[in-house]
Amino acid sequence: MQAFTTHHGLVAPLDRANVDTDLIIPKQFLKSIKRTGFGPNLFDELRYLDHGEPGADNSRRPLNPDFVLNQARYKGASILLARKNFGCGSSREHAPWALQQYGFRAIIAPSFADIFFNNSFKNGLLPIVLPESQVNRLFDEVNAFPGYRLMVDLQRQVVIDQSGNELGFEIDDYRKQSLLLGLDEIDQTLLRADAIRAFEAQRLAQHPWLRKHV
């Protein structure tokens, strides 16, 4: 997965609480067995005025001009500012896939649903929890200043606003190092491939009757 060290990006505000995973990526798009191609259907029900289906030509679909991601000032946004309990609902991993494939690298909110929170780290998407008062202030600033950007420094665990103010956030050290190195759980297992092979060889030497089952 893509490593995350620092990121400087345009912020898009999604000003609604309890955004569930079906709103992030509707259930009809879960039919795909691939892990790619979900970005165009991120927030499909909010983003378009018609009903979306897999395989549709999204370039020909009518856009909802009131939805934040369709507004010119937020084009190219890579940091999503959200409200509490973001990512609630079903446990579909397609939700962080869709957000990441749209172009988001980080999401800032007062709280996240647990499964979505965990799935985000596994896919290189950084969910940042900040106090609600700080999130409220960021919403005010994003709405007031077109082109509002933030810097996220994962190593130092800070979000830096345009005035240079630093907002600290907590993150588990294992998840932090995984993101900094760009290693998911499979990658980290493969780093120990030599040790795994040595263990298997030693075990077969001690228990040769297991060989026929290998």
Image (tube, grey):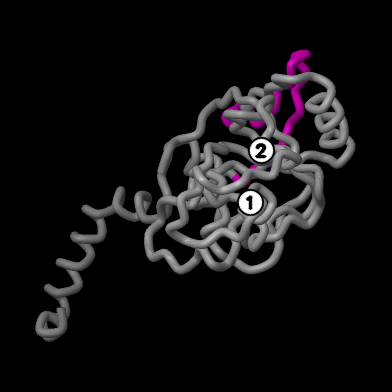
Q: Residue 152, relative to residue 162: is it above or below?
A: below
The answer to which image quadrant residue 73 occupies is top right
Q: Residue 110's image quarter?
A: top right
Of 131 and 178, nearer the camera is: 131
Q: Which residues are magenta?
A: 153-172
Instruction: Name which residue lies at 66% across and 38% down.
Output: 69
Residue farthest to the top, as pictured: 163
Contact, CB < 8 Å: mark 2 with mark 1? yes
Quarter of the image with the N terminus in it = top left
Relative to 95, is 23 on the left or the right?
Answer: right
Q: Circle 1 is placed at which residue position?
A: 43
Q: Secondary structure at mark 1?
A: loop
Q: Indicate which disc, 2 or 1, sits on the residue closer to the N terminus.
A: 1
State whether residue 70 is above or below residue 31. Answer: above
Residue at image location 82% in from the left, 36% down from the top: 135
Residue at (61% x, 25% y) in the render: 9
Q: Which amino acid, by three-letter code, is at mark 2?
A: Leu
* Drawn side of residue 79 relative to residue 211, left or right: right
Dividing the image into 4 quarters, which one contains the C terminus?
A: bottom left
Vertical comparison of 174 with 26: above or below: above
Residue 94: in magenta span: no
